[in-house]
Amino acid sequence: MTDTVLHLDRISKRFGALLANDAISFAVGRGEIVALLGENGAGKTTLMNILFGHYVADDGSISVFGKPLPAGQPHAAIAAGVGMVHQHFTLADNLTVLDNIMLGTEKLWRPAARKAQARQRLTRLAQDFGLAIEPDRTVAALSVGERQRVEILKALYREARILILDEPTAVLTPQESQSLFATLKKLTAQGLSIIFISHKLNEVLSVSDRILVLRAGKLVAERKTRETNRQELAELMVGRPIAEPKVEPQPCGEVHIEIRSVTTSDGLDQASLTLHGGEIMGLAGVSGNGQTALANLLSGLSRQASGSLHIFGQDAGNWTPDRMTIERIARIPEDRHAEGLIADMSVTENVIAELYRDPSLNRHGFLDWGKAHEFAKAIIKRFEVKCPSPQARVRLLSGGNMQKLILGRTLSLDPRFILACQPARGLDIGAVTYVHQRLLAARKAQASVLLISDDLDEILALADRIAVIYRGRISAPEPRKAVTIKELGLKMAGHGFGEGEAHAA
Amino acid sequence: MDALDILFSASLWAAAIRIASPLIFATLGELISERAGVLNLGIEGIMTVGAFAGWFTVYQGGDLWLGVVAAALAGSAFGLLHAMLVVPLGLSQHVTGIGITLFAASLTYYTYRLAFPEVTSPPKIEPFAPWPVPVLSDIPFLGEALFRQTPLTYLAFIAAGLVGWFLYRTPAGLAVRTAGENPAAVEAQGIDVTRVRIMAVVAGSALMGIGGAFLTLSAFNSFYFEMVNGRGWIAIALVVFGSWRPGKALLGALLFAAFDAYQLRLQQLAGIFVPYQIFLMLPYALSILALILMSRRASYPRALMIPYRKGER
């Protein structure tokens, strides 16, 4: 490392009883990409919020380009050349790109903003860094990847020399992630330094120069990216050896799900797919290509306009969501906050959401809360959900524990078919491993699993066969061993989905 | 004179513009506040306060313009109260706003009774006189309709232009608009969201106060109970009608006022017997219709009515 641009010295921050950052020190050099790796709650975001002035550290100091940075002033951080791209974009949807970028760059009481000048500068910046953007479009009309570009340009516009990216790929498709990485390389080539916060090992390994591992508020390790590997990082992050999921070969059973050239109004286009018991079918695809439509179809939320759907040998074309539950079809919804759980209701109420009409939970037409709480307690215990009590509001649970609760609710019913939509999204390694183990256990019990995911690693790790969904069509599934990432990537981009082929499949 | 002739009389349009003036002030005030993300249902009460404060200042011997300033200050004081409750404390904006309206109006009537315990007929002042704009007021039709108004009416139109300029052309206006869309974005740029919102509510309330004062200092010459008469609520609808844009809101206010002026004249037409309440209802019924047609696709400020707390997502 030649010139140090940023130096953090023994930063500590305490939230009540929780020590979020414990005397963390490190330095970042010019033109370097440093990855800050750690599980959810390891203290990465807290640390960066301190650096950016959103929080004030209890102890320790920060210097930028050799000058001490005053604590708790985002203004000072921006002026010192620190730019931050938050995990949740801080953009105003109904305003234009230019407005979003200009916000806060001029003295508030100027009688008129210098829009023309700003537009010129933005265009030049966009050209210099290869970040194409139209200044006059409203942010609402942009894709997620484009919005991130706006965030990066926003920082560059403020002459950021140190760029902090908080979980930048959480919302990106694999393609968008790749283009982001290319951008980052371009930025460092021009002398910028980047701090890349992530819990995804592959990304960290492919993009960074150096990796700092945070665990429970402490900086536990520092590695040169060239000199480390996935396994070591995972163990450093979690603090114990991690077993990668083992998929043991097993013969698959009878046909469970048979979709035959189904078209729906919400996005499926003559899609066909067959699933067997004891099999995990991985469905890859860029999000928005009909995954939601397929999930809706298989959970009884929508009907096919043409084609047929058979489940367990019966015509399921007009099954209601209720009937699906009765037939022991388990759903892990894509968005656990919006569809999976009701945040302001208790753990018990959420756990019985699919079951409350079941005779076992009712007495004389009234809910038997005693039994409901028992049922909830059993799930909490069996699925290791960390929560204060069954009466606790779900809002208080962490993402991982919410997902465990959903798993518990669906898997405790001994399902025959599991519709798993993005089951590991936003979870840390520990929780991901747990979810995967549960899915594999269900597979072993001869359940069929449809794993819809935009994380190719996840699909390649778990699935017996893999299909790709593109614009509402589903490719013919292939055994996992027969496909490569490259082939999948091409299919996800629409190769091999020509008119004739799709109909033939 | 029949119903159609009325439409082409300059006096109708002069009246429409007169009636629109307090609505324009009030609508602009509400618009600034909502653009920053704060619904201000205190508007009806704040207008009452403004009407009284302006009139009372003049009654006590103050200049008419001093009355306008007093109305703005009184309005902003109640705006500040609303802002403190809903912005830093994050209370429900509906409930607080209705509370402010009830409180402000009652306090005004109470003060009025304290000041004038005995009077039965309201004391009068000398209000703003029409000020014909030189040259322009001589244009046939247009001159009579537009340019023989009182100074406060001209001020209303100037205010609309200034608010538009402020929101769309100045850095501070951009901060206000962003605070109403995504306050986190404002915070991320090191600008204090709380301060932006409070100032927007206070400034908006000052305009509402002036809107109220228009009634006592320009339209009439004394203060009556219930004289604001729902104009604040109309302003809230006009903000939606105008899709939160000053220009469209101004048009909305004019449209509503034109209906109102028209129905007043229709009432006086000799002809078939229709209860006059039908005419009174007309502008409101038409505004509901216009709202349905115009604002279904309006994009409201995303953070409207959502309290912002630092560090929360």
Image: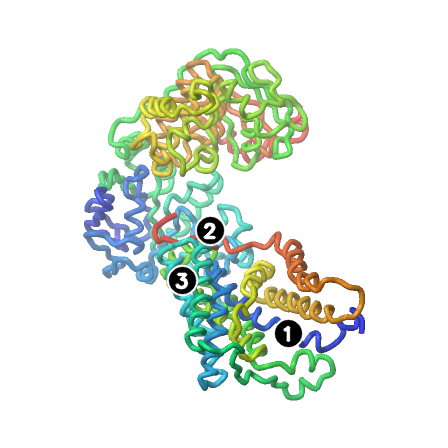
Q: Where is B117 relative to A232, above or below?
A: below
At a point 43% along the width and 30% down the height, the residue shown is A423
Q: Nearer the viewer, mark 1 or mark 2?
A: 1
Q: Is residue A191 left or right of residue B174?
A: left
Examine the rendering and report whether any part of residue A130 can be seen. Answer: no
Mark 3 highlights which residue? Answer: B83
Task: Answer with left or right where residue A247 lies relative to residue B44.
Answer: left
Q: Which mark is residue A282?
A: none
Vertical arrangement, residue A320 with respect to residue B6, above or below: above
Same-chain status of marks 1 and 2: no
Residue A292 image-quadrant placement: top right
The residue positioned 49% from the left and 64% from the top of the image is: B43
> Which residue occupies 56% across, 64% down?
B230
Image quarter where the C terminus of chain A lies is: top right
Q: Secondary structure at mark 2?
A: helix
Could you tell me residue A49's position as x and y percent? 31, 51
Q: Nearer the viewer, residue A266 or A125?
A: A266
List the residue tagged with mark 1: B17
Quickly name the residue at label 2: A149
Crowding near pointer 1: few (<14 within 10 Å), some, many (20+)?
many
Q: Callout 2 environment at 10 Å: few (<14), some (14 to 19), or many (20+)?
A: some
Label 3's element? helix
Residue A364 seen in the current view: yes
